[in-house]
Image (spheres, rainbow, N blue to C red):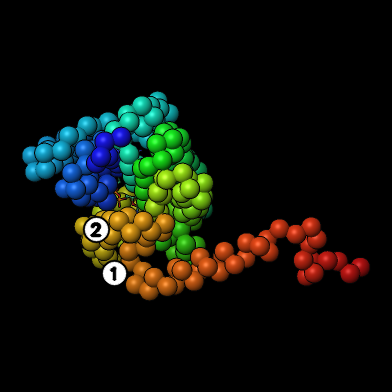
Amino acid sequence: MSEIPAVLITGASTGIGATYADRFARRGHDLVLVARDVVRMEALANRLRQETGVAIDILPADLTKAEDLAKVETRLRDDTRIGILVNNAGTAIGKSFVEQSVDDMTRLIALNATALVRLSSAIAPRLANAREGAIINIGSVVGLAPEFGMTVYGATKAFVLFLSQGLAHELGSKGVYIQAVLPATTRTEIWDHVGADVNAMSNVMEVGDLVDAALVGLDRREPVTIPPLHDGGQWDRVDGARKSMLGNLVNALPAERYRTTA
Ligand SMILES: NC(=O)C1=CN([C@@H]2O[C@H](COP(=O)(O)OP(=O)(O)OC[C@H]3O[C@@H](n4cnc5c(N)ncnc54)[C@H](OP(=O)(O)O)[C@@H]3O)[C@@H](O)[C@H]2O)C=CC1
Ligand SMILES: N[C@@H](C=O)C(=O)O
């Protein structure tokens, strides 16, 4: 791996992914951009090549399609210049659970969850072998909040958090850093896809502020970065409470409250 590793970013044609591309290029990283819209990625790549001089490859892929996913997996396995994977591509679907089509739910899970597992699996052995590198997974605060009413989307984001924490547990000791980033409402096109007007919402974060904050978390090697959460101690307390339960989770006998008295 080169001293400044190349970064492969999924969902790099717009929004959070395109902003990561901008910021990593300005830090001197070569890039591999992955998404479906080649025209947009070309425009971004041309601008960033001119402004920063880094090398940028475009790898068009629909990450819900097995053959496209396989191309990206192969690139992650074989291209030893790539030392950072940003698993950002994702979408959301509108309406309530009973109104959503199961086919839409299945595509959502394929993009927001399955693709992350496959791409992480493609690069992790190589990074662990080299004892360096990083995987950045973009989750969402919705993954902490069933009450927000985006059930399947939120479930995929809870999956992203668990996957990240599990990978950090398994790979941290092998020199691979894993970061879960949990944005809240951020001004991007994702809101068009759920049929909502982001301009009518309050407390919307600008995408540049979100990614710059996430990069502060990256530089600090935080396992979980939640840019919109002002009291970081709240997350520490929630995660601490979870960890304090670990030693009590496995027992031979059911808890007293479940024992029948009949
Ligand atoms: N914006 C927000 O409020 C929040 C966003 N997030 C998360 O941030 C991540 C980025 O979202 P955001 O930038 O807002 O969304 P955008 O809709 O602006 O961008 C999504 C990106 O993913 C790509 N993408 C979508 N579908 C596919 C596909 N099938 N295969 C490959 N690439 C695909 C799109 O490119 P193309 O269409 O060219 O394929 C695009 O580059 C997502 O994981 C999202 O869940 C989390 C919390 C809040
Ligand atoms: N992307 C948003 C939902 O559509 C979110 O995670 O807040």
Left or right side of 227 for 150: right
Residue at x-position 27% and y-position 31%:
59
* Disc number lying in front (2 or 1): 2
Tell me if residue 107 can be seen: no
Question: Is 182 or 176 nearer to us in this picture?
Answer: 176
Question: Is 51 or 201 nearer to us in this picture?
Answer: 51
Left or right side of 201 for 47: left
Name the spot of residue 214 as percent of width and height, x first: 30, 57
The amino acid at mark 1 is Asn
Furthest residue toward right: 262
Q: Is residue 133 above or below residue 141?
A: above
Q: In this view, does 175 lie above or below 199?
A: above
Tell me if residue 178 can be seen: yes
Q: How far apart are marks 2 and 1 (CA)?
A: 17 Å
Q: How many marks?
A: 2
The amino acid at mark 2 is Asp
Residue at numbered disc 2: 212
Residue at x-position 40% and y-position 54%:
180
Left or right side of 187 for 177: right
Q: Earlier in the sequence, mark 2 or mark 1?
A: 1
Q: Which quarter of the picture shows residue 70? A: top left
At mark 2, the secondary structure is helix
Q: Residues within 10 Å of mark 1 (few under 14, many from 20)?
A: few
Give the label on residue 203, or none: 1
Residue at x-position 36% and y-position 45%:
134
Q: In this view, does 132 lie above or below 225?
A: above
Residue at x-position 68% and y-position 64%:
248
Name the spot of residue 185 as percent of width and height, x first: 32, 61
